[in-house]
């Protein structure tokens, strides 16, 4: 007798659970404004990437053309596949000491796997993720980028 | 000569008289058959192309996507582009395949669905052949398709194809029972197997309303089992693409693959139109007893529109099934048929017979 009731309760429970699923897809079908697909080339003007999106490594500069990079080279060490080369320079300080500064921060976008270890390891938060993602170029050499802008200097209050 | 879109009988008689006046009756019949064949072929191609597009759009909307939208407005010409691509593709020669059976299988499948469409009434008078055992005929020819599937799987010389074909065979033979029994429930109510008389019987109310509870149960069972019979999801074990690449049509390419693809959609169209005809009144407009004004407005909508509307509603429900439910395992599939659908169906026939006997239907 028990199994007899189980047969029918099974049927009703199955129907109920199937209808629950059909309710979800049916609601989606009749609510086209919930569509999540981005129509990419058409919406280029309004496309807003998310903050966590890993587009490329960039070095932000302020209005005085100053960045936060001290040229320590930790990012170069942290990079697992050699996408970053840090070329250092020495300048003479007013007190007679020599100070190490960044000469060129070379970033090979074509080799980058977007793991983010350089950004995590940077002690002075000089490099961050950029939102740009249209990286297609006709010449491979354009993928090698120098992140510090020409004539830029370090922000004064950065200490190592 | 008064033609109308509400009744094609006079139009057909006019063609018949015109042909018989100009030639012997043999040639008249031959030309009529050619016209009907060409009309059905054209209809078949158009509906097949539209259904593929509709399937992709419905699927997309149910998954919160946009679907094809690049070729033409709303992607409407996408399936035509796909069709041209399939036409231009190479027909790959399969080593060690049984060439005769391999090439025969797509034609068997497509002929089976072609034969079934002949008995379907599209509108009043728009009916290629009105058998007095119409339902029996449709059940008989639509189950011929499994022969094509089995041949395709066997002759491909591919283990995936063979597994897919055997699954398909087990599935179609099981679910054929439920399809037949659920239609039998309505035959008891209608008292005839002739499609034209079944539709005439629904002039004052569709059978799903006239037969209330047993008719509704039969409708649900018919929907489930005909979805299984056409090898569509969630019963698409025969071509379970994650397990068997594409099942019985793995080795087919180009236009032969297109035949399988087209036949799948046309089988869906055929079972949907049988469901619409038998349960939802076919081309008969929606009538409410006693509401003369309402019935008169409904009569203005042409029967062909009613038929297409009902058929696409049933097709939409079957697409809804496919894009909601996960695929069943083979043992679950057979459990569903033999332990649930078949006993319920048999009891349902008894109930329907009792209802008809006592006159409890409307």
Image: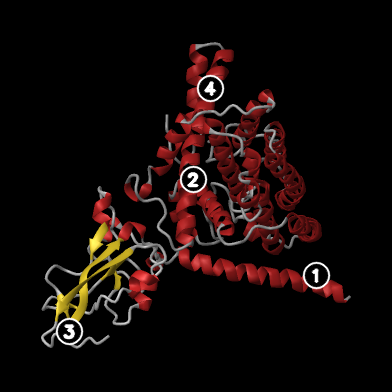
**For the residues marked 4 and 3, what is the alpha-carbon distance in whole angstroms?**
101 Å
Protein chain holding label 3: A
Q: Which tag is nearer the camera, tag 3 or tag 1?
A: 3
Q: Secondary structure at mark 2?
A: helix
Q: Residues within 10 Å of mark 2 (few under 14, many from 20)?
A: some
Q: Does residue A75 appear left or right of residue B19 in this picture?
A: left
Protein chain holding label 2: B
Q: Which tag is nearer the camera, tag 4 or tag 2?
A: 2
Numbered badge on residue B52: 2
x and y percent of residue B56 in the render? 47, 51
Give the position of the C terminus of chain A as an image quadrant.
bottom left
Q: Does residue B69 appear left or right of residue B249 in this picture?
A: left
**For the residues marked 1 and 2, what is the alpha-carbon distance in whole angstroms?**
38 Å
Of residue A78 and residue B174, the one placed in the foreground of this image is: A78
Q: Which tag is nearer the camera, tag 2 or tag 3?
A: 3
Compared to residue B194, the image places residue B298 above or below, namely below
């Amino acid at each position: 007798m028990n199994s007899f009731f189980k047969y029918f309760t099974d049927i009703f429970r199955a129907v109920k659970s199937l209808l629950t699923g059909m309710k979800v897809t049916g609601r989606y079908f009749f609510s086209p404004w919930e569509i999540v697909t981005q129509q990419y080339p058409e919406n280029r003007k309004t496309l807003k990437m998310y903050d966590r999106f890993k587009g490329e490594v960039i070095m932000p500069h302020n209005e005085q053309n100053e960045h936060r990079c001290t040229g320590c080279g930790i990012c170069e060490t942290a990079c697992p596949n050699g996408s970053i080369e840090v070329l250092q320079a020495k300048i003479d300080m007013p007190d007679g000491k020599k100070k190490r500064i960044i000469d060129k921060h070379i970033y090979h976008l074509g080799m980058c796997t977007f793991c983010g270890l350089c950004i995590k390891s940077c002690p002075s938060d000089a490099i961050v993720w950029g939102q740009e993602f249209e990286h297609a170029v006709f010449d491979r050499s354009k993928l090698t980028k120098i992140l510090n802008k020409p004539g830029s200097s370090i922000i004064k209050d950065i200490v190592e | 000569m008064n033609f109308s879109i509400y009744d094609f009988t006079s139009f057909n008689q006019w063609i018949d008289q015109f042909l018989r006046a100009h030639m012997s009756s043999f040639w008249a019949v031959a030309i009529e058959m050619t016209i009907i064949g060409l009309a059905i072929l054209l209809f078949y191609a158009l509906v097949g192309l539209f259904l593929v597009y509709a399937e992709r759009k419905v699927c997309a909307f149910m998954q919160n996507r946009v679907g094809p939208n690049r070729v033409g407005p709303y992607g409407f010409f996408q399936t035509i582009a796909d069709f041209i691509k399939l036409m231009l593709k190479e027909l790959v020669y399969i080593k060690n395949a049984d060439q005769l059976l391999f090439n025969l299988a797509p034609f068997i499948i497509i002929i089976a669905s072609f034969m079934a469409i002949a008995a379907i009434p599209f509108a009043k008078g728009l009916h290629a052949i009105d058998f007095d055992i119409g339902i029996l005929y449709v059940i008989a020819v639509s189950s011929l398709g499994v022969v094509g599937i089995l041949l395709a799987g066997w002759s491909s010389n591919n283990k995936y194809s063979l597994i897919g074909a055997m699954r398909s065979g087990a599935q179609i033979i099981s679910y054929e029972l439920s399809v037949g029994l659920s239609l039998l429930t309505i035959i008891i109510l209608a008292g005839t197997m002739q499609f034209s008389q079944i539709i005439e019987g629904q002039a004052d109310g569709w059978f799903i309303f006239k037969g209330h509870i047993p008719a509704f149960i039969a409708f649900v069972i018919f929907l489930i089992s005909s979805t299984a019979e056409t090898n569509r999801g969630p019963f698409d074990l025969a071509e379970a693409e994650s397990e068997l690449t594409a099942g019985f049509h793995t080795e087919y390419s180009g236009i032969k693959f297109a035949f399988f693809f087209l036949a799948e959609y046309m089988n869906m169209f055929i079972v949907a139109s049988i469901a619409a005809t038998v349960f939802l009144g076919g081309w008969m407009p929606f009538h409410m007893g006693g509401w003369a004004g309402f019935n008169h407005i409904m009569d203005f909508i042409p029967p062909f529109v009613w038929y297409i509307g009902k058929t696409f509603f049933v097709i939409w429900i079957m697409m809804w099934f496919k894009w909601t439910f996960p695929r069943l395992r083979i043992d679950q599939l057979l459990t569903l048929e033999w332990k649930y659908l078949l006993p319920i169906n048999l009891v349902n026939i008894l109930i329907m017979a009792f209802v008809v006997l006592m006159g409890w239907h409307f």
